[in-house]
Image (cartoon, helix red, strand yellow):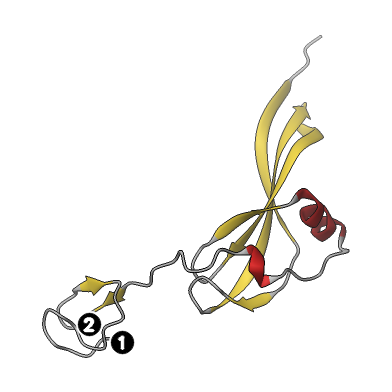
Amino acid sequence: MFIIFGVNQRQENLEFNQTIVCPNCGKFGSVQIIMVYTCLSLFFIPTFRWNRKYYASLSCCGTTVELPKEIGEGIRQGTIKSLDESIFPEGSYQHVHTCTNCGYQTTEDFEYCPKCGSKLL
């Protein structure tokens, strides 16, 4: 008799719908909740899950933070419908401005390109 089993890591996108103003980049973004877990599969059927971790990711700048287990479980069970914006770090994102005329890139908030003088968008 053969028993086929395997242990691997999987991820699942949870149903969660919230739009916030990102404290990191200042743009509107939607929050996506991702559950990452270790899974034991028997005959290619997921049987046991453990070591669950929850992450919140923003669509605007890609900032991703790990959520406390209680909040992640609440979102998975449907008891938590929104997140506080303070869970995301503030100010770690640097927006890159690119000149449409010469292609120069800068993270400074210049109104005009320091290389060619064209107006930055």
Indicate the quadrant where residue 17 lies: bottom right
Q: Is residue 25 left or right of residue 1?
A: left
Please give left or right for residue 40 compared with residue 62 in the image.
right
Q: Classify 99 as above or below 46.
A: below
Nearest the eye: 26 or 32: 26
Which residue extends farthest left? Answer: 116
Q: Which residue is mark 1?
A: 121
Lower position in the chain sequence, tag 2 or tag 1: 2
CB contact under 8 Å: marks 2 and 1: yes
For residue 84, the mark is none
The residue type indicated by label 2 comes to Thr
Say which element carries label 1.
loop
Q: Residues within 10 Å of mark 2 (few under 14, many from 20)?
A: few
Can you tell which mark lies on residue 100?
2
Q: Which quarter of the rendering shows the C terminus?
A: bottom left
Task: Name the image quarter holding residue 100.
Answer: bottom left
Q: Would residue 105 be seen by someone viewing this image from the given angle?
A: yes
Nearer the viewer's eye, disc 2 or disc 1?
1
Residue 92 x/y as whole percent: 46, 64
**Residue sitting at x 52%, y 72%:** 60
Pick whichever, 6 or 83, lies toward us. 83
Residue 57 is situated, as x and y percent measured from the top left of the image, at 60, 61
Q: Is residue 44 visible?
A: no
Q: How many marks?
A: 2
Task: Name the amino acid type tagged 1.
Answer: Leu
Q: Residue at x 26, y 83 (%)?
A: 110
The N terminus lies in quadrant = top right
